[in-house]
Image (cartoon, rainbow, N blue to C red):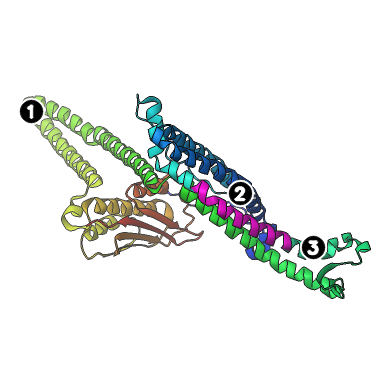
Amino acid sequence: MAMAYGPDTGHPRAPRLPAWLGAPLAARTWREFCHLLLGLPLSLCYFALSVTALAVGAGLVVTFVGIPVLALGLAMCRGFGVVERARARAFLGSRVGDPEPARAEPGTGLTGAVWAVLKSGASWRHLLYAVLHMPWAVVAFSLAVTVWSTAWALFTYPLWRWSLPLHAGTDGIQVYGDGTRAYVLDSGAELAVTSGVGLVLVLLGAWLVRGLAAVDRALVRGLLGPSRLATRVVELESDRGVVVDVAAADLRRIERDLHDGAQARLVALAMDLGLAKEKATEDPRAAARMVEEAHDEVKLALQELRDLARGIHPAILTDRGLDAALSAVASRCTVPVTVGVDLPERPAAAVEGIAYFTVSELLQNVSKHARAHHATVDVWRTGDRLLIQVTDDGRGGADPTRGTGLAGLAERLDAVDGVLAVHSPEGGPTTVTAELPWRG
């Protein structure tokens, strides 16, 4: 496995304002405010059209005309979802995947298309969004516009107070008046207090806008995105592809090792033994020498076959478990390795195999790239998870994005619902933690 080590070439970031102080001026806040502004007119349109389609379709369903009308309304709601996902992507920075399409059975024609839309859970979730988002959009619009505009008006009051009409008999905002007396904000102290209150409201209003937008973001993700089941199916399909690719790569490696290693030696051995057989009567001494050389070739071929078998699935892992197998791997590492395995029982054979090869690849990387003086391997169980941690005191700087080894290992673990985490600052130490599901 190859892991990229080396200095970080990234440029240091310029210091920024604290999040709570820079929020009112952040582009994100203003984008989310625009999202809330557009939400009300769009939600009113969605609500009116979807409720109308639902009412007409339900009312006409006894005549069977309402069924295609209802399907058409649901398809229209799916179109609303396209707009809302694009809006969330543009203003909220939230990339929500498309839901599972409503696929009709081949050869069913228009009837199949109508039935596919009606039985699609995603279609009904889109309708639910169109109905529920309208009252929420009214609340979000009212709060955002009232608080945000009032906050900025008070904060900038000293800048625009001059625009108030003097001919009306006032030179400031009238806070109170009963016909005989009035309280107007016109003195310097009052201007400062008003601006200070506005500043507080601006700071609070920015986070209010973000909170309201977060609810919108959750609604879009929960109702307009793919369902959990569909997402899980996609993940399993992707994981299956990774497993198939890994298995195919392992088979090609085994075939290559057999062809270039043991098979080539056995072919040469057969030729040497054939020559020795021909010379047995003519030159017994030369034949004996050739048989001795052939014997050495047999030993090398056997060693290569043992190494190949160990790479497929070591016998020590099957017979004695992870503790002994990892100790054997550690003994072949070029740096001293301390192994600690604390497992109450043995996990499933498949999990043991993945754990073994994970540690094997990580220790191989330590030997080749880390320039470490010592490494540690710890394996333990926490709840229903098997945890593996490999630490070395090498130079650090390991980055999965710059090396194919860690990325490939992460894909293999992800294929079995595992996780790989790397912490490797410049100068070390490097800690790689792998988490696997426990299957006894």
* Magenta stretch in the rendered image: 129-150
Type of the residue with mark 1: Ala
Mark 2 is surrounded, within 10 Å at the Cα level, by few (under 14), some (14 to 19) or many (20 or more) other residues, namely: many
Could you say which quadrant of the image residue 431 lies in?
bottom left
Along the line of sight, the residue nearer the viewer: 313 or 85: 85
Q: Which secondary structure lies at badge 2?
A: helix
Residue at image point 86% right, 75% down: 181
Disc 2: which residue: 39
Type of the residue with mark 3: Thr
* Distance between mark 2 and mark 1 Cα atoms: 96 Å
Residue at image point 58% right, 55% down: 213
Mark 3 or mark 1, which is nearer to you? 3
Disc 1: which residue: 280
Q: Earlier in the sequence, mark 3 or mark 2?
A: 2
Along the line of sight, the residue nearer the viewer: 295 or 45: 45
Q: Which secondary structure lies at badge 1?
A: helix
Disc 3: which residue: 156
Residue at image point 58% right, 58% down: 212
Q: Which secondary structure lies at badge 3?
A: loop
Image-based side of 224 in relation to 257, left or right: right
* Distance between mark 3 and mark 1 Cα atoms: 109 Å
Could you say which quadrant of the image residue 118 lies in?
top left
Residue 438 seen in the figure: yes
